[in-house]
Image (cartoon, rainbow, N blue to C red):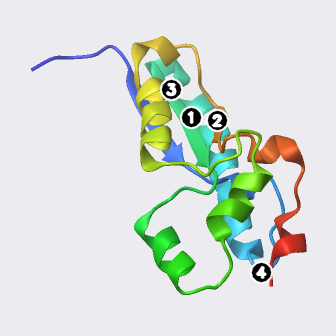
Amino acid sequence: MTQSAHGRIINISSCAGHHSAYGRSVYAATKGAMESFTRSIAQELGERGITVNAVAPGTTVTDLFEENERADTRDWRALFARWTALRRVGEPSDIADIVAFVASDDARWLTGVTIPADGGLVTTGINIATYAG
């Protein structure tokens, strides 16, 4: 068994903690709370060599996303892609790669931060509420 001198806690948040989305206020509030918790617990556990960070995915093609897409006539994939700087929606592997980095020794000096894993959605300044409905 390998013993490590450090630990990693990685919370999964959402880009909804960084922008408004009509009808999702409670969801967004929980993500904001998760990010505040991440910063606070990082302070508490840092002296024990434990880093605590969060990853905040944007729209990601999951089974639920595809199920919702099939149930609607709008092309949600194209719409969300238009809102990101990289002009595509995320794949699960995009998020997994960022989580793997945060768990690695390469991220040993990161703690108390939230990494937006959203293809640049937050940088575009889009208010998703404008497009809901």
2 and 1 marks in contact (CB < 8 Å): yes
Tell me residue 113's x, y (percent). 66, 32
- Quadrant showing the N terminus: top left
Q: Which of marks 3 and 2 is nearer the N terminus?
A: 3
Tell me residue 62's x, y (percent). 45, 62
Q: Earlier in the sequence, mark 2 or mark 1?
A: 1
Secondary structure of residue under mark 4: loop
Q: Residues within 10 Å of mark 2 (few under 14, many from 20)?
A: some
Q: Earlier in the sequence, mark 3 or mark 4?
A: 4
Tell me residue 27's x, y (percent). 67, 70
Is 123 rendered above or below residue 110? below
The circle drawn on residue 51 is 3
Image position of 109 (left or right of 124): left
Q: What residue type is labelled 4?
A: Gly
List the residue tagged with mark 2.
115
As measured in the structure, the alpha-carbon distance from the residue carrying label 3 to the one carrying label 2 is 14 Å
Q: How crowded is mark 1: few (under 14 residues within 10 Å), some or many (20 or more)?
A: many
- Quadrant showing the C terminus: bottom right
Can residue 32 be seen here?
no
Image position of 117 (left or right of 22): left
11 or 18, nearer to the observer? 18
Q: Which of marks 4 and 1 is nearer the N terminus?
A: 4
List the residue tagged with mark 4.
23
As measured in the structure, the alpha-carbon distance from the residue carrying label 4 to the one carrying label 1 is 27 Å
